[in-house]
Amino acid sequence: MRYAKAVYATLIVIFLVAPLLVILPLAFTSSAFLTYPIPRFSMRWFNELATNQTWNRSILNSAIIASSTTVLATVLGTLAALGLRSQDLRLKSQIRTLFLLPMVVPAVVLGVGMQAVFVPLGINSTYFSVIVAHSVIAMPFVVISVSGALAGVDRRVERAAESLGASPWRVFRLVTLPLAMPGVLSGAALAFATSLDEVVLTLFVAGPNQRTLARQMFSTLKENISPAIASAAFVIIVGTVVIAAALLLARMTPARRKGRVPKTT
Amino acid sequence: MSRAPQLKALVLIAPLLVFLGMFFVWPLITVISQAISDPAISRVLPHTASAISGWNGKDLPSDEVQAAFRADIAANTDEMAMGDVTRRLNASKSGFRSLMGKTVTALKETPEIPLVEIDKRWGDTAYWLAIRENASPYTDAYLLASIDMERGADGAIKAMPEGSSANAAIILRTLWTSALVTLCCLLIGLPYAMVTASVTGWKRALLLGAVLLPLWTSLLVRTAAWMILLQENGLINQALMGLGLTNGPLALIYNRFGVVLAMTHVLLPFMVLPIYSVLLTVPGNLMGAAASLGAHPVRAFLRVLLPLSLRGVISGMLLVFMSAIGYYITPALIGGATDQMISSVIAFYATGSANWSMAAALGLILLVLTLVLYALYNRLSREPGQAR
C-alpha cells in the first residue's frame, strides 16, 4: 500500500512537471527542429528572436502592454480592495462577485464583445484596447491578493495612528499600504504574468502592430513548430521570474522604511 | 456619521466599477443584444415597422402603413441594406425579390403611386405578413440556429435539415470533451489529493509544489510543451519505439487523445486543490477509527473519507468542467479539425466569416452555461462557512 502510494505520487509528479522541464533545454538547440536529442547547444534561436523583426517587435509589444496592464490593474484593483474592506458598503458581496467575474467569463465571449464595442468607437487595434482588455482579466488577481493581505492588517494599528493625529492619507501611506504591500506586489506580479500569457482577447482586440509575444507564439505554433517557440517560452518564464524577483526586491525598501516609521513619528 | 465610511468605500471602488462597466459589462451586454437583435428590416423600414405592428393581419394594411412603407423606400439611400431586406423577406415569402425590385424602381419615379398599381401582389396579405414577421428588431433565429433549429414558414420551431449545420454537434462535443477531461482529472486528482493530505513535511511540500508549478506557468508554454512531447518524432513516440512497443510513431497529436491529455494536465490543479483543502479539515484519525471498528480499507474509504471529501470533489469537478467548456488555445493547437470546441467556432464566426450574430448567439450559450456552473460553485464554496 505504501509503495503503491509512493509510485503513484511519483508518476503524477512526473506527469505534472516533466512537460515543463522538457521544453526549456530545447531553447538552446542548434537544430532546426524542436526534437530531442539536441545536436549541440547554441544560442541560434535566441539570436533569431533578437534579430527577426516580427519576434523582437512582439517582445517589445509584450513589455509595453504587460507593464501598462500591471500598473492599471494594480492601481484599480488595490483601490477597490481597500474600498471592499469597509463594513458599511451595501451590496458588498455582489460587487466582489462582479470584480471576480472576469476570471470566469470565457475569454472568447469577452473578446467578441470587446471587439464589437471597440470597433465602432475606432479604438480597436490600438495599444489602448489591448491594455484595457488585459487589465480587465488581470484585475481580479490584484483584488484577491490585496484583499488577502488587507485581511491580515490589524485595524487597531490604523486606529492607533489616527488617534495620534495622523491624517487619513498619512495613515494609508505610512501604515496600511506598507502592511498590505506584499499583497499589492504579488497581485502586480500575477497581473504581469496574466498579460504576458494572454492570447485569446489579444486575437480580437489587437491589430498587427500590437502583436504580443504570446500572440506570435500562438500563430507560430499553429503554422510550424519552430525552436523559436522554446526560446520564446524561455523568455516568458524568465520574464515572469524576473518581474516577481524585482517586485520582491522592491518590497525590501518599504519594509525597511516601515521599520523606521515609529522613530520619525 | 455612518454615511462617511460608506462614501469613502464607494469612492475607492468607483474607478474599478466604472472601468468594468465600460470594458467588461458593456461588451457582454453587446454580445447578448447582438445574439437576439436583427435590425435588418427595422433599420431600413423604420416607419413601416412601427406602423405595421398595429395591423390586424386579416384585412389589407391601412393607407397609413402603405404610406409609411412608400416613404421608407423613397428615403432609403443604402442599396446594400435594401438588398439585405429583400433577401430576408424573400426567405420568408418567395416572390419578394422581383416584387421589391419592381416596387423600388416604380417608387423612385412616382413616389405617390398606390402600391397595388405597381404590382397586384401588394393586394395579397401574405406579403404584408412576411414584412410584419420580420419587422421586429429582435429575433430568436440565431439562438435557434446555434442549436440547429429554425422557424418554419408557419413560425413553428423545427430542426434544421440534416447536415446543414454542425453547431449542435459542436456543443455536444464540447460538453463531452469537457466531461471526459473532468473525469480524467477526478481519477488522477482525487487519489493525488488524498496522498498529499496523508503525508507531511517535505513530501507534502513536493507534491503541492508539483501541482502549483504548472498553475503558475504560462498556459501557452504548457500547451507548447505538450505539442513537443506528443508530435510524431517527439519524446513519447521516440521512447515507445525505442522500447520496441510500437513499430511506427503513434498519432498522439491533432486528435481527441492529445486534447484530453493536455487539458487534463492544464486543469488538474483545479481538481487537486479544492479536494486537498477539504481533506485538510478531515480529522486524520477517522480512517484509523474505521479500521479499528473492522472496516476494510475500501469500505472505510467509501463510507468515511469519500463522503467527507465530497464537497471538495464537487467543487473541483465544477471548476474543471466550467474552465474546460470555454477552452480555446489547447484544442486549437493540439486538436484536429474534428476536435474543435465551441470557443473555436465562436472565434471562427467572429473573425473568419464575420458572422457577428452567430458568434454572439453561440457566445451567449457558452456564457450562460459558464455562469450557471459558477453560481453553483459559488454556492457550494460559501455554504461551509455558514454551516460551521
Image (cartoon, coloured by chain):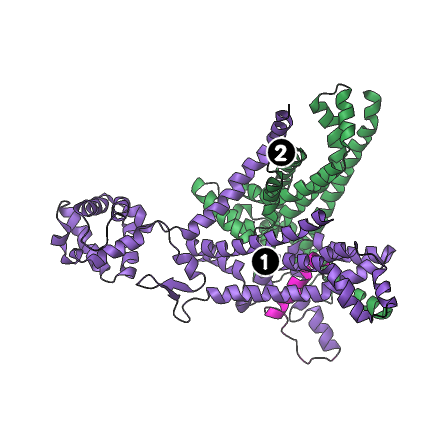
Chain colours: A green, B purple
- Residue A188 visible at all: yes
Q: Which residue is mark 2?
A: A89
Q: Amino acid at mark 1?
A: Ile
Q: CA distance from mark 1 to mark 2?
A: 39 Å
Which residue shows up at 49% across the image and 45% down it?
A: B27
Which residue shows up at 53% across the image and 53% down it?
A: B367
Q: Is residue B228 left or right of residue B276?
A: left
- Residue A12 visible at all: no
Which residues fall within the magenta stretch? B244-272
- Measuring from the top left, give residue B239's x and y in whole percent: 73, 73
Q: Is residue A50 left or right of residue B97?
A: right
- Measuring from the top left, give residue A144's x and y in whole percent: 68, 43
Out of B353 and A220, give the one closest to the viewer: B353
**Secondary structure found at label 2:** loop
Circle on res. A52: none
Of tags 1 and 2, the one toward the viewer is 2
Q: Residue furthest front?
A: B293
Task: Please say if B117 is above or below B195.
Answer: above
Let me know if residue B259 is in the magenta part: yes
Let me know if residue B234 is in the magenta part: no
- Measuring from the top left, give residue A9's x and y in whole percent: 80, 64
Q: Amino acid at mark 2?
A: Leu
Q: Quadrant of residue B289?
A: bottom right
Which residue shows up at 60% across the image and 29% down it?
A: B11
Q: Residue furthest top?
A: A165
Q: Which residue is mark 1?
A: B329
Q: Quarter of the image containing the N terminus of chain B?
A: top right
**Circles 1 and 2: CB atoms closer than 8 Å:** no
